[in-house]
Image (cartoon, rainbow, N blue to C red):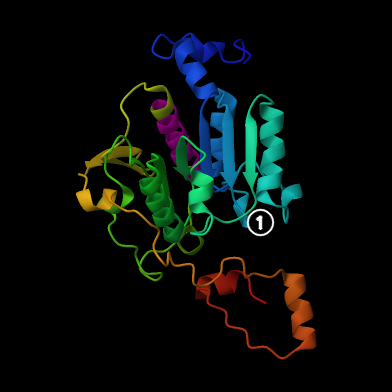
Amino acid sequence: MNLERYSRQIQLKEFGLASQEKLFTSKVLVVGAGGLGVPVLTYLNAMGLGSLGVIDNDVVGLSNLHRQVSYTENDIGKSKISVLKEKLKAQNSETKLIIYDVFLTKENALEIIADYDLIIDASDNFPTRYLVNDACVILDKPFVYGALHSFEGQVSVFNYKNGPTYRCLFPTMPKANEVPNCDENGVLGVIPGIIGNLQALEAVKILTGIGNVLSGKLLLFDGLSQNFQKITFKKVAKNGKIRMLNESYGFECDVNLSITSYEFKNLVKIKEIQLLDVRTKQEFDSFHL
């Protein structure tokens, strides 16, 4: 470990060499390499995390670029995780990077998560959040939660030192049509950077033991008013007693079943198909076939 590299944070009396050494021996898994995952990975990598795992199976799209600032126009169509790996290696060659070019599922979650000290949920959907929560409860791993909505964001820490879990705050997974995601509702480009950096900060506090961790507290950020507020919530005992993953986390529609525009064009040539476009009218008007 090159101490000069981290000298500006080592000289903090509340942090010091002991905390830097804790970071260097820690293993953190980041679930998602998008709007939240990019700032989380960028800053933890810069600060000297010993091992960083990242799991994602998406590709870079043009609509990602306004908020996922590690990617460029030249990366469009490429695997996010492969692009990000090269950027992180160039930023800090000391970090051990472990790449999982898959989606997190109930078949692989326990095996992957078991190898890490801390999980950071940088996903963008409810099935993954509930899956991360349940796997972390089973394996007794803390995880840092972040979520986005328009001009707002949320951060909390779950399952930390026998503290509340995600299900203590959100007991039941909402139905698909109950809560819009950022594709439907939109998100201001800078908001993921703010929330992702707050997640990275919580991760550093957990790993080093400094400061007060957001366990049992939900931090709410409103970007339009620059307002922060905290909501306190308690642990529900039964939510800490999960011993196995549920049969379903909303993955009945296989997330891997997607095709490119070129594949679709060829499919239309060889067979008659019925196409259902489920986008909103606004989305259809902005770009349609």
The span shown in magenta is 192-205
Mark 1 crowd level (few <14, some 14–19, many ≥20, 10 Å Cα): some
Q: Can residue 31 be seen in this view?
A: no
- Which residue occupies the foreground of this view, 153 or 129? 129
203 falls in the magenta region: yes
Q: Is residue 245 visible?
A: yes
Residue 184 percent location from the top left of the image: 48, 64
Residue 271 percent location from the top left of the image: 75, 89
Corner quadrant of residue 47: top right
Looking at the rendering, in which quadrant would you find the N terminus?
top right
Name the residue located 48 percent from the left edge and 59 percent from the top edge.
Answer: 106
Name the residue located 64 percent from the left edge and 35 percent from the top edge.
Answer: 97
Dot 1 amino acid type: Gly
User: Which SS does the magenta portion mostly show?
Assistant: helix
Residue 187 percent location from the top left of the image: 48, 53
- Residue extending farthest bottom: 272
- Which residue occupies the foreground of this view, 53 or 78? 53
Q: Name the residue under label 1.
A: 61
181 falls in the magenta region: no
Side of 214 relative to 88 (left or right): left
Name the residue located 71 percent from the left edge and 68 percent from the top edge.
Answer: 260
